[in-house]
Amino acid sequence: MHWTPKRLEIEAVLSLDAMKRYQYWIKKVADQQQVWSLWHEGNWVLAGDDSGSQLVPVWPHASYASLCATGVWNGSDPKVIPLHVWLDRWIPGMEGDHRRVAVFPTPSDQGISMEPKKVEDDLRNELLNYE
């Protein structure tokens, strides 16, 4: 079940547009049962969008998250979130805090901004393929 993307896979995935990276993220997260984000000085990192919304950035693997630990996130470390915790605690928490999910940002792209409920629905639909 443990997967580590190789350099060629990373390069290929980073070249995808944001929606295709989102679809990749859904499949990998469902398969691996984990979500990755960045942790810095006792807190999860956040991003912002042009409308002032706070975004929780997420990746399918630590390798991808590490690539974004630059700039304002410099010194951040990838940290795993078990999928059941993501679905049961994070999704309701983000909804309650009026935050969105920044799915799979890259060093050159902000990723796709999604409502937590949409991310949850897509993940749960993908998980049906694994039952």
Image (tube, helix red, strand yellow):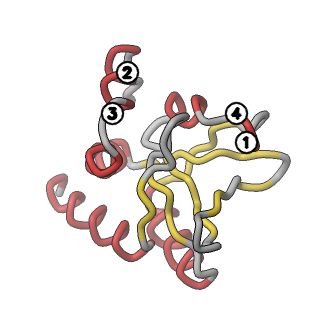
Sequence-first disc among 2 and 3:
3
What is the crowding at mark 4: few (fewer than 14 residues within 10 Å), some, or many (at least 20)?
few
Q: Which residue matches tag 3? A: 1
Q: Secondary structure at mark 4?
A: loop
Q: Amino acid at mark 1?
A: Trp
The CA distance from mark 4 to mark 1 is 5 Å
Q: Amino acid at mark 4?
A: Thr
- The structure residue drawn at horizontal position 38% and vertical position 16%, both measured from the top left corner, is 6
Sequence-first disc among 4 and 3:
3
Q: Which residue matches tag 4? A: 70
On screen, residue 64 versus residue 70, left or right, reads left
Q: Which residue matches tag 1? A: 73
Q: Position of residue 126 (x, y in %)?
A: 21, 58
Q: Residue furthest bottom?
A: 96
Q: Amino acid at mark 3?
A: Met
- The image quarter containing residue 128 is bottom left
The CA distance from mark 2 to mark 1 is 21 Å
The CA distance from mark 3 to mark 1 is 29 Å
